[in-house]
Structures are given as C-alpha cells and as structure tokens.
Image (spheres, grey):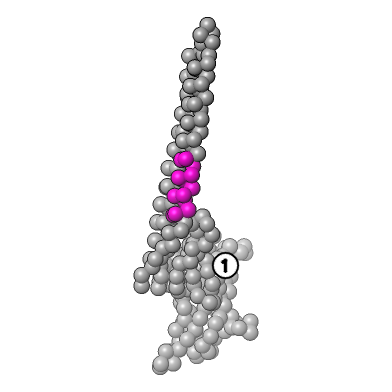
C-alpha cells in the first residue's frame, strides 16, 4: 500500500522561512542605510567613535545570526516532522497496542475461539497479577491468577474460554487487572490491540494522527506502546 505525504506543511514552513529571511535582509539594509547616512553627516570635528560603530555592527550581526539560527531550527523541525510521518506511514496495515482495555473474540470455521492480544504495564513488581475478562453486561467471564510479575510491559492473549472451560461467545470484552505487592496495589496500565489503517495530517504545524478505524478512532503516534 503506497502512502502520499501531504506537503502543504512543508510549503508553509518554507514560505515562513522565506518571509523571515526577507525581513532580516530588510532590517540589515535599513541599518546599513542609517549607518551610512550617519557617517556622511557626522561632524568632521567630532567623528563617530570607533567603539560605537563596532558595537552597532555587532548588534546587526547578532540579529542576522539569530535569524539564521531560527531558519536552521525550522529546517530541522521540518525534517523531524517528515521523518516522523514516514515512520508512522510504515505502520499502515500493522497491529499496535494503544491505551485501552478492549478485547475482541471471534471463532474460526471450526468453532475455535481466537482473541486479539492485550498488554499490561506495571509501574513496579507485583507478588500477584490477576486478570479478569468482563463481558458487555459487566459479568466476569473468566479470571486468571498469573502470580508474580516483574515491572514493565507484558503482552497476553486470552484463550477465549469462560470459567467453565467452554468457548465464550464472540464479541467485545474488557480486561480488568489487579496487581498487588504485599497488601499494596501496584499501578497498572492496560493496552488493547488495533490495526493501523492510515495516517491523517492535522493542523498547520505538521502534526498527524494514526487512524485506527471506527472503533478506536484516531490517536497520536506517541500513544503506540508496542508494534505487533
């Protein structure tokens, strides 16, 4: 699948840089005109002090240097934005984990359940990690005691079975996680699976969002926790 990146942002930045350069040139021309006029009309018996003239020249050079630095930073920013968008475009058609607690369950032609993966991130180690699968009515379909788990990100896949050991009905479920270190709760983040369908430019500053479809909507590129 090919992807075309919208160049309007790059054109806007280029136009801005051109305008900035023009303003800087006009400022330097005005300054040199004023300095030349001042030199022509100075009192021959009381000429301009060399130190004063050097100071004024240094000031205009400083302004020019700042303008040049700003143009360089704008160019770097443009390159970073373009690079980020190209990297995001490479995710089209791939599965990612983004913040959320949704799990989708389906059955194959033989009736074997298959669910989308989900991720769990622990802020610290836990003595016991418990994962519950909740149906649309808020009922616990199954619960798994996973024991001790280290801090960090882990990826899991539900086997699609209920607490009786039979296949749960196809549909959308939620993941509920409890993590304890001793008698204290450990901070937990949950992530659900989504398929990247496209990259959407937004705003006038070169931003973009990943399009994850009608269910998950659009998210920032930084929201991607893991690429599957």
Say whether residue 223 is visible.
no
Sort mark 1 into few (<14), some (14-19) or many (20+) by Cα contacts within 10 Å: many
- Is residue 38 highlighted in magenta? no
Q: What is the x, y in percent for residue 211?
A: 49, 70
Quadrant of the image for the N terminus?
bottom left
Q: Relative to 96, does residue 24 appear above or below in the rendering? A: above
Which corner quadrant of the image does residue 130 belong to?
bottom right
The residue under the point 58% across, 74% down is 176
* Disc 1: which residue: 179
Quadrant of the image for the C terminus?
bottom left
Q: What is the x, y in percent for residue 37?
A: 51, 21
Stretch in magenta: 10-22
Q: Helix, strand or loop at disc 1?
A: strand
The residue under the point 51% across, 33% down is 27
Q: Tell which of 97 and 26 is nearer to you.
A: 26
Q: What is the x, y in percent for residue 124?
A: 53, 59
Q: Tell which of 30 and 106 is nearer to you.
A: 30
Q: Tell which of 21 and 79 is nearer to you.
A: 21
Residue at far top of view: 45
Residue at far bottom of view: 110
Main secondary-structure element of the magenta-colored stretch? helix
Q: Tell which of 183 and 171 is nearer to you.
A: 171
Q: What is the x, y in percent for residue 122?
A: 53, 63
The residue under the point 45% across, 45% down is 18
Judged left or right of residue 138, residue 27 is: left
Say whether residue 34 is visible.
yes
- Is residue 21 highlighted in magenta? yes
Judged left or right of residue 197, residue 169 is: right
């Amino acid at each position: 699948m090919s992807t075309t990146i919208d160049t309007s942002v790059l054109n806007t930045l280029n136009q801005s840089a051109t305008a900035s350069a023009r303003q800087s040139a006009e400022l330097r021309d005005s300054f040199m005109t004023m300095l030349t006029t001042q030199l022509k009309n100075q009192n021959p018996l009381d000429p301009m002090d060399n130190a004063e003239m050097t100071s004024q020249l240094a000031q205009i050079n400083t302004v020019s240097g700042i303008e040049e630095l700003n143009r360089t930073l704008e160019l770097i920013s443009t390159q970073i934005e373009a690079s980020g968008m190209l990297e995001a475009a490479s995710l089209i058609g791939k599965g990612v984990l983004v913040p959320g607690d949704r799990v989708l369950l389906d059955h194959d032609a033989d009736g074997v359940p298959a669910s989308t993966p989900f991720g769990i991130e622990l802020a610290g180690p836990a003595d016991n990690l418990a994962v519950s699968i909740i149906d649309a009515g808020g009922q616990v379909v199954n619960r798994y005691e996973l024991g001790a788990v280290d801090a960090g990100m882990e990826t899991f896949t539900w086997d699609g079975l209920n607490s009786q050991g039979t296949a749960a009905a196809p549909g959308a479920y939620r993941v509920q996680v409890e993590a304890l270190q001793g008698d204290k709760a450990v901070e937990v983040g949950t992530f659900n699976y989504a398929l990247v369908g496209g990259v959407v430019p937004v705003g006038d500053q070169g931003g973009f969002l990943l399009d994850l479809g009608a269910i998950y909507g659009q998210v920032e590129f930084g929201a991607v926790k893991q690429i599957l």
